[in-house]
């Protein structure tokens, strides 16, 4: 069961189950201002990101900002908006002969120092961001319209006009394993290239890069936990099947995105479980 949607079942676990749905230190997010909320409205639009755009000065946008008229498309398209807050990055948005010169090439980037492995070989580095392709060109000349995520110049993710998500007005979560870059200082860049015969729009928001000295996704299974213990996942933690918090045990499960209690999970009378997650 997913704890966040199952509060009605908590009394079945244990009366002393303690829930804390936020914690200030659940792994290290290495990205500065991943929501782009430190925008200024005067390109370059954000002091935390290196920005460029062939036509618009910067892909970083805020709808309704009078200094950023190009962030309000005509006709108005509700899907061109932030996932959270008011700022976001908008790649593309250009049609040949209108509003600028084709092609449109835009990018935002940030230098990130990913800490070295702690010595146990269990460290993780994971990129998480939200993206959507609400409008995609159907012109064959625009077949290469795409957004790429590059780490140290290497393409680690891409989406474009051929993506099955084209036309979906909703953001989707993307997770990219960056373990090969542990111990390196790298440039993380979102780069879009668009031919501009017809309009293609790709939006990005809420970027995070979690770095931990333990694995990204932790599973605790077939175990009785005694004493005082803390179990951590850099992204997620799943407890089950057959996990028991023993009498008098004081246990913490924590992960930034989610903690899920699976089949056969139980807390004995006198046991205590605290769950910490920074997930929205």
Image (spheres, rainbow, N blue to C red):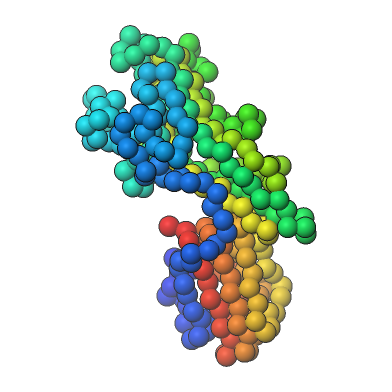
The residue located at (58%, 74%) in the rendering is 252
Farthest residue, direction right: 120
Going by the picture, which residue comes out furthest to the front? 47
Give percent across and percent down for residue 180. 71, 42
Please indicate whether residue 265 sits to the left or right of residue 55 in the image.
right
- Residue at 63% x, 85% y: name it: 249
Residue plotted at (50% across, 85% down): 16
Name the quarter where the C terminus is drawn: bottom left
Q: Quadrant of residue 71?
A: top left
On screen, residue 129 above or below 51: below
User: Relative to the observer, which residue lies in front, 20 or 258?
Assistant: 20
Give the image location of residue 139, x and y in percent.
44, 14
Note whether 62 is above or below 12 in the view shown: above
Residue 70: x %, y % from top left: 29, 25
Q: Is residue 156 above or below residue 213?
A: above
Identify the residue at image location x=35%, y=39%: 39
In depth, the one of 36 and 47 nearer the eye is 47
- Answer with left or right where residue 23 lies relative to residue 135: right
Would you say residue 31 is visible in this rendering?
Answer: yes
Count numbered badges in the picture: 0
Q: Is residue 260 at least partly visible in the picture? A: no
Camera-nearest residue between 65 and 279: 65
């Amino acid at each position: 069961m997913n704890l966040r949607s199952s509060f009605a079942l908590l009394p079945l676990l244990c009366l002393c189950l303690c829930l804390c749905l936020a914690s200030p230190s659940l792994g290290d997010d290495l990205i500065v201002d991943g929501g782009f909320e430190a925008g200024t409205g005067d390109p370059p639009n954000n002091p935390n990101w290196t920005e460029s755009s062939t036509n618009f000065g910067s892909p970083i946008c805020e709808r309704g900002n009078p200094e950023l008229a190009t962030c309000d498309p005509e006709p108005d398209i509700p899907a061109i908006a932030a996932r959270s807050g008011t700022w976001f990055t908008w790649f593309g948005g250009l049609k040949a002969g209108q509003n600028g010169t084709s092609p449109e090439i835009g990018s935002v980037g940030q230098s990130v120092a990913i800490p070295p492995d702690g010595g146990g070989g269990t460290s993780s580095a994971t990129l998480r961001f939200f993206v959507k392709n609400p409008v995609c060109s159907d012109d064959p000349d625009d077949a290469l319209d795409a957004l790429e995520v590059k780490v140290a110049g290497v393409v680690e993710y891409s989406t474009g006009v051929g993506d099955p998500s084209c036309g979906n007005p909703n953001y989707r979560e993307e997770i990219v394993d960056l373990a090969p870059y542990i111990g390196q200082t790298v440039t993380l860049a979102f780069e879009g290239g668009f031919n501009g015969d017809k309009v293609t729009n790709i939006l990005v928001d809420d970027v995070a890069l979690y770095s931990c000295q333990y694995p990204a996704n932790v599973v605790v299974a077939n175990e009785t936990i005694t004493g005082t213990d803390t179990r951590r996942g850099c992204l997620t933690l799943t407890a089950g099947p057959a996990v028991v918090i023993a009498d008098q045990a004081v246990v913490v499960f924590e992960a930034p995105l989610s903690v899920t209690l699976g089949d056969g999970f139980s807390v004995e009378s006198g046991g205590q479980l605290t769950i910490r997650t920074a997930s929205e």
